[in-house]
Amino acid sequence: MSLSPPISKVDFIKEILAQIHWRMNKHLPAKLIYMPLPTTLYIELTNACDHRCPLCIGQVNRRAKGFMDFKNYKILVDEVKGHVKEIVFSGNGEPALHPKVYDMI
């Protein structure tokens, strides 16, 4: 049994995106519009928030509060460069609370 040579992280991400794209579209008849790959990446920089909005799901969130590691953020952004058109800071927290938010913008 021979092993395949290792692939780069970028090629790995491309393969995952291609598989997701194929799985999203494999059941569609040829006459329907073919769905493109996602163009937006949503990232939760933190789940910490200093607001107390009454309807926010963050009020009942049981996860420990934390911040995305800047190194992991850079790796993620570098890997999707050229594949997405925009990155949105979203999620259950207030992105402006992240200590490195200005470096991330």
Image: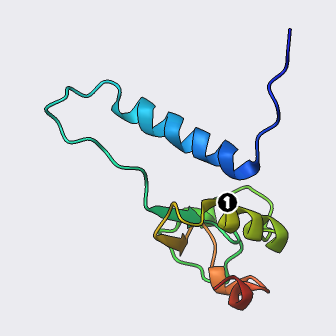
Q: On the rendered image, what quadrant is the C terminus found in? A: bottom right
Looking at the picture, how far across and down is residue 87, in whole percent? 53, 71
Task: Name the side, left or right, on which 98 lies relative to 52.
Answer: right
Q: Which residue is mark 1?
A: 79
Looking at the picture, how far across and down is residue 81, in whole percent? 59, 66
Task: Name the side, left or right, on which 83 lies relative to 47.
Answer: left
Q: What residue is at 43 percent from the left and 61 percent from the top?
A: 39
Task: Name the side, left or right, on which 43 lies relative to 9.
Answer: left
Q: What residue is at 67 percent from the left and 46 percent from the top?
A: 11
Total number of numbered discs in the rendering: 1
**Closer to the camera in the image, 51 or 47:** 47
Looking at the picture, how far across and down is residue 53, in whole percent? 52, 77
List the single residue furthest toward the left: 31
Q: Secondary structure at mark 1?
A: helix
Task: Name the side, left or right, on which 31 lies relative to 53.
Answer: left
Q: On the rendered image, what quadrant is the N terminus found in? A: top right
Amino acid bearing label 1: Glu
Q: Residues within 10 Å of mark 1 (few under 14, many from 20)?
A: some
List the single residue furthest toward the bottom: 102
Question: How are the residues colored?
Answer: rainbow
Q: What residue is at 59 percent from the left and 79 percent from the top?
A: 52
**Closer to the camera in the image, 49 or 19:** 19
Looking at the picture, how far across and down is residue 62, in whole percent? 72, 55
